[in-house]
């Protein structure tokens, strides 16, 4: 062993894989890759998690945005990265819940092409209408939509986005005919809804809360099995007559395929530790987020369940990406 160590010292070689690297992990700053530009919900969640992870593992965590093609650009970058645990990915409902069933062929396998470490957070959607829509409940809106087929429009952040699929699912479940209006992002879509260009929308609470509190939108249902603490009078999906439509936006931690098990276990424990912190839970709650740490196996099962749900919606509706 002494000879091996001397030879390594002479050659200037530092092992980067195997037991030594796992014991010393992490040996340099981590990179947390996001699939969206700065400023949105993913950036907000990523920076909270990144800051805490840096604190707990003793290395800087650099947030890196690689947006484009519905998350495919970022996903490709991560799946091809060195599997040493220093490149991580904020996987999401967009990159792993919807993309695998929306695109006919992805240049990677959404399960085998990654090491899935833990679910982090679930952000249930809110159903909201423009304040001028004469409906105070979901049942009243369904009645309006059925009375005037094709008269009501729902915006989304783009073709194939989670907000669109929520609208398509609503149409399937209720037998209504709504017109989809795609925008380039949730921000413009919510502005279109608030201005009256559209009538109803399903999206994460961070996108809608400002316009709801400003009085331009009316919340009709929390798409979850519990009510939002910030809107305690708004019924859940089941209470509003939409059982089975619970869901929303979610984020997890993944990495390239082949990360060593000890590193996966370390990161999994750190995520559980992070989301248990009172300040993190408080910041998550301000955007309607619910901490949901999981085992790697359970995270994979969760992704597959989401694929099945949205795959059926895509099949029936014919939804397709831009």
Image (cartoon, helix red, strand yellow):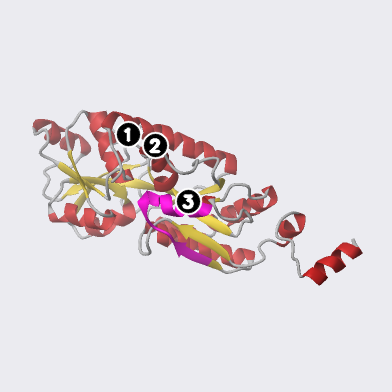
Residue at x-position 50% and y-position 40%: 109
Q: Are marks 2 and 1 in contact (CB under 8 Å)?
A: yes
Q: Residue 104, image x and y in percent?
A: 38, 36
Q: Residues within 10 Å of mark 1 (few under 14, many from 20)?
A: some
Task: Give the camera-side residue of 270 and 312.
Answer: 312
Q: Earlier in the sequence, mark 1 or mark 3?
A: 3
The nearer-to-camera label among 2 and 3 is: 3
Residue at x-position 48% and y-position 63%: 48
Q: Which mark is residue 101?
A: 2
Q: Residue 33, image x and y in percent?
A: 48, 59
How far apart are the alpha carbons under marks 2 and 1?
A: 7 Å
Whether residue 9 is in magenta: the answer is no
Residue 74 visible (yes or no): yes
Describe the element under mark 1 as helix, strand or loop.
Answer: helix
Residue 164 sits in quarter: top left
Q: Which mark is residue 76?
A: 3
Q: Are marks 1 and 3 in contact (CB under 8 Å)?
A: no
Whether residue 68 is in magenta: the answer is yes
Q: Which mark is residue 261?
A: none
Label 1: which residue? 314
Task: Give the camera-side residue of 27 and 8.
Answer: 8
Q: Earlier in the sequence, mark 2 or mark 1?
A: 2
| Chain part drawn in magenta | 62-78
Describe the element under mark 2 as helix, strand or loop.
Answer: helix
């Amino acid at each position: 062993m002494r000879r091996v160590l001397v030879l390594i010292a002479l050659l200037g070689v530092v092992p980067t894989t195997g037991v030594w690297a796992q014991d010393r992990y992490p040996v340099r700053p981590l990179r947390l890759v996001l699939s969206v530009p700065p400023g949105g919900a993913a950036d907000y969640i990523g920076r909270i998690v990144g800051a805490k992870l840096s604190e707990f593992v003793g290395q800087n965590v650099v947030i890196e945005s690689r947006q484009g093609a519905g998350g495919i650009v970022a996903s490709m970058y991560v799946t091809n990265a060195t599997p040493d645990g220093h490149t991580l990915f904020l996987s999401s409902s967009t990159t792993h819940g919807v993309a695998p069933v929306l695109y006919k062929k992805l240049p990677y396998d959404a399960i085998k092409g990654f090491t899935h470490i833990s679910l982090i957070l679930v952000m249930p959607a809110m159903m909201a209408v423009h304040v001028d829509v004469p409906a105070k409940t979901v049942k009243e809106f369904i009645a309006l939509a059925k009375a005037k087929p094709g008269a009501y429009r729902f915006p989304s952040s783009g073709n194939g986005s989670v907000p669109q699929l929520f609208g398509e699912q609503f149409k399937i479940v209720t037998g209504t005919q709504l017109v989809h209006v795609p925008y380039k992002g949730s921000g413009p879509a919510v502005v279109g809804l608030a201005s009256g260009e559209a009538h109803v929308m399903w999206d994460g609470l961070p996108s809608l809360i400002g316009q709801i509190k400003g009085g331009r939108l009316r919340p009709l249902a929390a798409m979850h099995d519990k009510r939002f603490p910030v809107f305690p009078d708004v019924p859940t999906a089941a209470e509003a007559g939409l059982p089975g439509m619970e869901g929303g936006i979610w984020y997890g931690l993944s990495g390239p395929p082949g990360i060593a098990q000890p590193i996966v276990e370390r990161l999994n424990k750190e995520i559980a530790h992070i989301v248990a912190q009172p300040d993190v839970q408080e910041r998550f709650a301000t955007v309607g987020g619910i901490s949901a740490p999981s085992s790697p196996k359970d995270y994979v099962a969760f992704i597959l369940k989401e694929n099945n749900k949205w795959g059926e919606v895509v099949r029936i509706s014919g939804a397709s990406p831009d």
